[in-house]
Amino acid sequence: MKKKLYCFDFDGTLTTSDTLLEFIRYAKGTGRFLLVFLMYSPLLVLMKLHLFPNWKAKQLIFAHLFAGMRIEKFDALCRDFAEEYQHLLRPKGVTLVHEALVAGAQVFIVSASIDNWVRPFFKVRGLDGVRV
């Protein structure tokens, strides 16, 4: 018997926006968010011009903001974010994920975002069978 496999992109497909930016603003506040992006604006311009890797720019900014934070605190922050920002999930996408799970399919969420805040979006909805 063959088992179906479904893969869903997270940011911008199952969600209405890039959750990295939303998470940073949630965790650090709008002022700090703007300050850090202003500090890194030359690097972000290079990234937009395809002269610096997107993943590396995100990694540097993320490390600047969250280095030294204990994992327990970070995970709690991620869970709180997912609970408060459920509105970012597209209802039709959540329905498709749910239907795939009910049909017995293996469901994977594909994302460049850190699974610490992606996974709780689905746990809140009771979609524990999703793999991130």
Image (cartoon, rainbow, N blue to C red):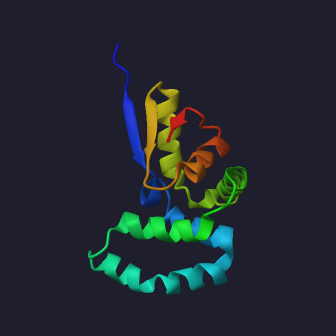
The location of residue 15, given as percent across then percent down, is 50, 58
Q: Quadrant of the N terminus?
A: top left
Residue in view at x 63 percent, y 56 percent: 86
Asked if residue 131 can be seen in this view, the reply is: yes
Q: Is residue 32 above or below residue 88?
A: below
Q: Nearer the viewer, residue 112 or 66?
A: 66
Q: Residue furthest top?
A: 1
6 shown above or below 45: above
Left or right of 28? Residue 113 is left
Q: Residue at x 55, y 50 (%)?
A: 118
- Answer with left or right where residue 131 lies relative to residue 28: left
The answer to which of 51 and 29 lies nearer the viewer is: 51
Q: How far across and how far down the image is residue 82, in percent? A: 65, 55
Q: How many marks?
A: 0
Which residue ends up furthest to the left in the rendered image? Answer: 50
Q: Nearer the viewer, residue 24 or 106?
A: 24
Expressed as whole percent of the image width and height from the top left, the position of residue 120 reads 63, 47
Q: Nearer the viewer, residue 100 or 38?
A: 38
Residue shown at the point (39%, 36%) measured from the top left: 6
Is residue 21 among what the camera can see?
Answer: no
